[in-house]
Image: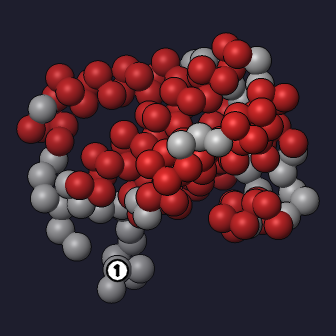
Amino acid sequence: MKARLNPYKASPEMMKAVGDLEATVAESGLEHSLIELVKTRASQINGCAFCIHMHTRDARAKGETEERLYLLNAWEESPLYTDRERAALAWTEAVTLISQTHAPDEVYERVRKEFSEEELVKLTTLIATINAWNRIAISFRSVHPMTKSAAA
């Protein structure tokens, strides 16, 4: 696969704006482990190899276990996630698939039990931000880094 264009070169001011939003989310006070799980799960749903590669590496660097990363796409079937993480992952799926789900009341009620109103805005902004990154990376065919031995 070959990248279509480099958005950072084509429109640095737009990419800076998305980067600024990313920085704000990173410093929002949400747990870094939760942030990486949400980013990875949204990227799995969207099929963004670039972002899955980045955020699983980031999660590992911040202490996330291989087992929890491997099981993330089946989080509902695994006891490895806290109630707060489960609520965030359910909300991530509902918001990422918003055209299909319309953010159901039952998912909202579940996330409201675990997150304050302020945290819920932060979480939803996190989800919106990773979805923006996914759409940029997928649209312009961003290619994740790889070793020569791993390349097809």
Query: Which residue is rendered at x = 44% and y = 34% of the image?
Result: 129
Q: Position of residue 61 (x, y in %)?
A: 64, 47
Q: Position of residue 122 (x, y in %)?
A: 59, 22
| Front in this rendered view, residue 25 or 112 | 112
Q: Is residue 151 left or right of residue 53?
A: left
Q: Is residue 30 left or right of residue 49?
A: right
| Front in this rendered view, residue 42 or 109 | 109
Query: Which residue is rendered at x = 53% and y = 37% of the image?
Result: 127
| Residue under label 1 | 151
Q: Amino acid at mark 1?
A: Ala
Quadrant of image for the C terminus: bottom left
Q: Position of residue 14 (x, y in %)?
A: 20, 27
Position of residue 132 relative to residue 152, above or below, is above
Picture quarter containing residue 15?
A: top left
Quadrant of image for the N terminus: bottom left
Query: Which residue is rendered at x = 51% and y = 27% of the image?
Result: 125
Position of residue 70 relative to residue 30, above or below, is below
| Front in this rendered view, residue 107 or 80 | 107
